[in-house]
Amino acid sequence: MTFSDYCLLSIFYFWASSTAFSLGIGYYTIYRPIVAGTIAGFILNDVQTGMIAGAVVNIIYIDFISTGGSFKGDQCLTAVMAAIASISYNLHPVEAAAAAFPFGFLGILIWKYRLVINNIFVHIYEKKYKENKAPDISLYNGLLPQLLLFVMSSAVIITAFALMFLFNKLIDFKSISLWLYYIGLLLVAFSASNILYKIRNKYNYIIFVSIFLADLIFDLRAYLLFILITFSLIFISDKKVNFYRNNFTGKIRKSDLVYSWFIWMNYSHSCYSYERLMGLAFAHSMKNILKKLYDNKYDISEAIHNHTEFFNTEPNMGTPIHGYIIALEEERKLNNKSFENISYIKKGMMGISAGLGDSFTQAILTPLFISMSVMLCLDESYYLAFIPVIFLSANILFISYNGFMNGYFQGRDSMLQRIKDIKQSKIKVYFSYMFSGIFGLSMSKLLFNNIRPSEDIFTLSIIIFAVCFTFIRKRGEQ
């Protein structure tokens, strides 16, 4: 690895760790191991190896869900380090995933201390507001927190680089490659058995095993299952899309809404803090709207400050709240209504959209499309593996943008309709069946296309042990 490789990987890790500069879809795409591993492989001039290493890490983190800033491990950092281990130290992807797995816990430090340190920016903003200095919200929600994240992410990944280099010098990964291989298999097997248990559907085991065995016998092609599931998703998806009406009659224009949506999507987690969570981000997204409604900079500052209160929701499913609040702010300016009513409405809507949103975007959409990408990658359909990621990105952007616009024109009805649509979604109903099939084929391709041929008996023994141990542990918890 060259110095430029280290610099590019550091910049990429910062980009992946931030919601900024990716329209909010980075968390669902470039932060995920298969994409992160691919980009790391591109930087290191071995895209295929990086992608496979990322795919293995993705299986280990297949049940990853972050709510309210909680993290069990940094899957992006793990994928980057796995790609480095596989390419630079010539480790098998399963071995590289095992060697990189501990670094995921190092990445947690970014979120843990970022949430604490970001409180400082909140306090500075509050102090300047109380001093009547009309502070610029974009500075305290955008520039400064992003500079902090860049410093923190650079420090973490440089530390990870140094530790991996040191470990290899002290231990020599090739000398313990067999142990790394078995540890990697254990991690994969535990993840597989754990996610199947979490789905809690008696048919998912049958589907998983059936597809797994069918691939062993008939060598199924992943792209055929991908096409089948894609057409199934088109068939079961709701065809009645509720488009907003493009009829602007007040001071707010479409360009104002688009820019506000753009700011929210890029900076929703920029100054994520324990004290306000997304409070400053919401105010940041309202800045251009309130500048359009008010002329005096102190009136604008006060209106922006009103929206810095505690706020937290799922950033894509919750966008009808933003549109609705913008409409209420416009009405408040015309009719001189109090802000308290708007505050109560905003807080009342954020909770249910957060819970339902995470249960759909993080627990349904992302695992479904990302697992299809993993499946295609492990079947050596490397170019096709990008298609599910593109589909996922398009879905997230549409959900977010359309909700934002509908919120402005339809108010709380748009949020109620969105809640109804999520609850009645057929994708949620059939998700476990599709996911089990995808996962069954992915595991088969991984374990019997990408393992050491001489280790089959040990591999199967590890899988059986991991599955049995998981069920014993789960029964003990009940």
Image (tube, rainbow, N blue to C red):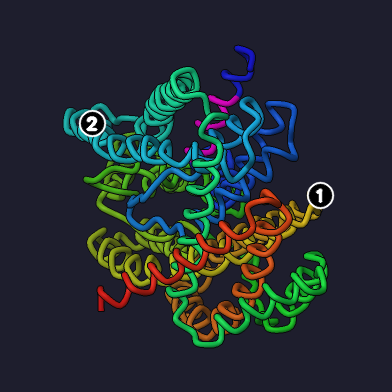
Whole-percent x and y of residue 361?
52, 64
Q: Is residue 256 visible?
A: no
Depth order, front residue of 369/266:
369
Magenta span includes 207: no
Q: Residue at point 63% right, 42% down?
A: 93
Spatial CA distance of label 1 from label 2 is 44 Å
Q: Is residue 9 above or below residue 58?
A: above
Left or right of 434? Residue 302 is left
Q: Amino acid at mark 2?
A: Ile
- Residue contact at pointers 1 and 2, CB within 8 angstroms: no
The magenta segment is 9-18
Left or right of 434? Residue 151 is left
- Which numbered circle lies on residue 383? 1
Label 2 Cα crowd, 10 Å radius (few <14 / some 14-19 / many 20+): some
Whole-percent x and y of residue 380?
79, 52
Q: Secondary structure at mark 2?
A: helix
Q: Residue at point 51% right, 74% down?
A: 410
Q: Residue at point 23% right, 31% down?
A: 120
Q: Give the residue at mark 2.
A: 120
Q: Is residue 262 above or below residue 114?
A: below
Which quadrant of the rendered structure holds the N terminus?
top right
